[in-house]
Amino acid sequence: MTESTVRIALVVPDLLGTYGDRGNALVLAQRLRWRGYAAEIVTVLSSDTTLPESCEIYLLGGGEDVAQQAAVDFLARGDGLHRAVASGAVVLGVCGGLQVLGTAFTTGDGRTRSGLGLVDITTEPGERRAIGELSTRGELAGVGTLSGFENHLGRSRLGEHTRPLGTVLHGTGNGTGGTEGAVSGRVVCTYLHGPALARNPELADVLLSWAVGERLSPLPEFPELTELRERRLRVRS
Amino acid sequence: MTNTTRQDTRAGQHRRDESCSPARPSRWRLVPPGGFPTEHDSPLRRVRTALAVAAGRLATGASRKLRLGSGGIIGGRVALALQPDLLDELVAGKHVVVVTGTNGKTTTTHMVAEALRAGGRSVSNATGANMLDGHVAALMGDPGADRAALEVDELHLAQVTERFAPTAILLLNLSRDQLDRVGEIRTVEASLRAALSRAPRTRVVANADDPNIVSAAADHPEVTWVSGGCRWKHDALNCPRCGAFLHREDTDWYCTCGLRRPHPDWTVGTTELIGPDGLREELSLPLPGQVNRVNATFAVAAASVLGIPVRQAVDRVRALRQAHGRYEQVLLAGHSVRLLLAKNPASWLEMLDLVAENERPLVLVVNSREADGYDVSWLWDIDFERLAGRTVVVAGERALDLAVRLRYAEVPCEVASAGVSQALRWASSHGGNDEPVEVIANYTAFRDLFSKRQRP
């Protein structure tokens, strides 16, 4: 237990937050509160002058091509996210967030743009959108099967020394070498889009234990969540 | 054959084009030697149109008799196969009011049709069959009517204005709605803008409080602006034109690029509507909520474009008690319920506003079929936290997703895994005497419940 408040930054949801992405902030905050920690969600809009550097967790969601570029511009302006990561902050990038955190991404118009370079992963458009249920075998300690929905055109290639978040069991994921997502230090990226942590409490708790710097007490099982995961993992479309 | 109007629109662009292109040659079309005469008023063409309408109406009737649905779509398809230019023929000489936007299309179309009846015979695609075949079917229903109110899918307005110029086009609102189908709002906005550019003499009635709609309509020369507030703002925080963050002060908004909220011609208050030239008219409706006062104002504004006096239009709209089941109090499996449709975050916000006015038990039903979108991530865009303290039962194919969402919102709920009947039994047993249960359902869930209703 700690007296200090864990601050969760929801980063530019006006640009990156097309479909339920804020759910990850709600899930993380509640899982902290249920364990007796104080948690606060800090919403950072693209109209804000800078990104606060004092948060423990930063969440980046998905967005359209133009919005994605605007998000990179906003985040590159002050270098705050780099400094936060250097001092141990946890970052989760979902879908467009993965591409923003990566080295470079090529958008639908064929232009290649620089990402923030916090993870060594590059993205190019694929032949067609990957849309549907996605499940992977988690590669992080403490994370079993991951389940979610994907909806993206990008195909992403991991740098030589970058680990994937998971190995694809069903779906497309990165679309290269059966990998899904990326992990680099405490920066985690995934194509499990939107409220990915809602269906993946183990991943949520790994991120939280990094953020609070201690092992977390277990929460009681939520039967509806267990059943939801079982059902979605059976879906093959 | 059903009247699943949204279903067809879910498919990719390719199939959409294919199924709706009126010029598509039909395999069993009879072509006389030398082809069909092309003169617009040739006798052959008139015979062909009459035949197409007769065949279409026959198909509609057969479909109804076989209880396959209300028959609108099949009738329209048969008629279009025989006469691909049928729509042009049917709208010739008619005043047509077209209604589009993400939410409120069906209800507003009902209201417009009702208001237009103050001026004479009117038709409308009241079942919500909102693409070409549905339009043709509606118009065939009474070819002698000289007015029509047509609901149009937001991605299909361009096809409409390619074929004819409506008298008025109503642009209600734009917000996120099944990204795996419709795509991004920018795409829809651009498509609406292109559609309007092809109808420069049409009167556009548009929402001044929705920046995406303003962006679509601002360049049109003939716009009447309606203001009734905009509850859902998360798709319009940034400028639709340039991407910069919008400045907002109270109801006003503007962007440094020049896009700004236009001065409204019609304003919707809590008890009255204020029209051009200081006109004021009391506006209290059986249909609930500010959202329906806004819909009604759009309908009244449209009717006045066609010369119908405001008071008459308001009286007509006031008579509506439901719109294709929306807001209707019905019996379902023996339980009294009020049926509410909510299919995306913006409409859920409006419906949660409505049910916040009472403390009745609540049944929430969510499916994820093709017509709903397979992805239910949007559940996390909705503030279910405000249901704290309420009796809630969840049902539908994605009941568990809802239950997880409610768990994190700290709203305890029952999961009715046996379906809506079980949910209603449970909810009714926890409600007050004779009070209807509130049922909020998304698209296919609502449609299924509506088809099973008994009138009280």
Image (spheres, rainbow, N blue to C red):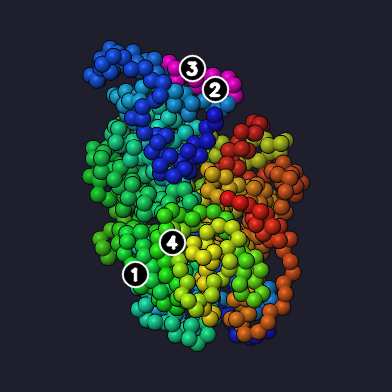
* Frontmost residue, B182 versus B97: B182
Residue B453, quarter of the rendered image: top right
Labels 3 and 4 positioned on one and the same chain: no
Residue A229, quarter of the rendered image: bottom right
Q: Secondary structure at mark 3?
A: helix
Residue behind mark 1: A113
Residue at (62%, 69%) from the top-left corner?
A: A138
C-alpha gap between disc 1 and disc 4 = 13 Å
The local crowd at label 4, few if under 14, some if 14 to 19, many if 20 or more residues have their Cα within 10 Å, is: many
Residue at (38%, 38%) from the top-left corner?
A: B17
For badge 3, the amino acid type reads Leu
Q: Which residues are magenta?
A: B54-67
Instruction: Look at the image and say whether residue A132 sits in the magenta stretch.
Output: no
What label sits on residue A154 in the rendered view? 4
Q: Secondary structure at mark 2?
A: helix
Residue behind mark 3: B58
Give the letter of the chain under mark 3: B
Residue at (53%, 43%) from the top-left corner?
A: B371
The C terminus of chain B, quarter of image: top right
Residue at (52%, 62%) from the top-left corner?
A: A173
Query: Is there CB contact under 8 Å for labels 1 and 2?
Result: no
C-alpha gap between disc 2 and disc 4 = 45 Å
For badge 2, the amino acid type reads Ser
Tell me which numbered mark, 1 or 4, is placed earlier along the sequence. 1
For badge 4, the amino acid type reads Gly
Q: Residue furthest bottom?
A: A87
Q: Secondary structure at mark 1?
A: strand
Residue behind mark 2: B63
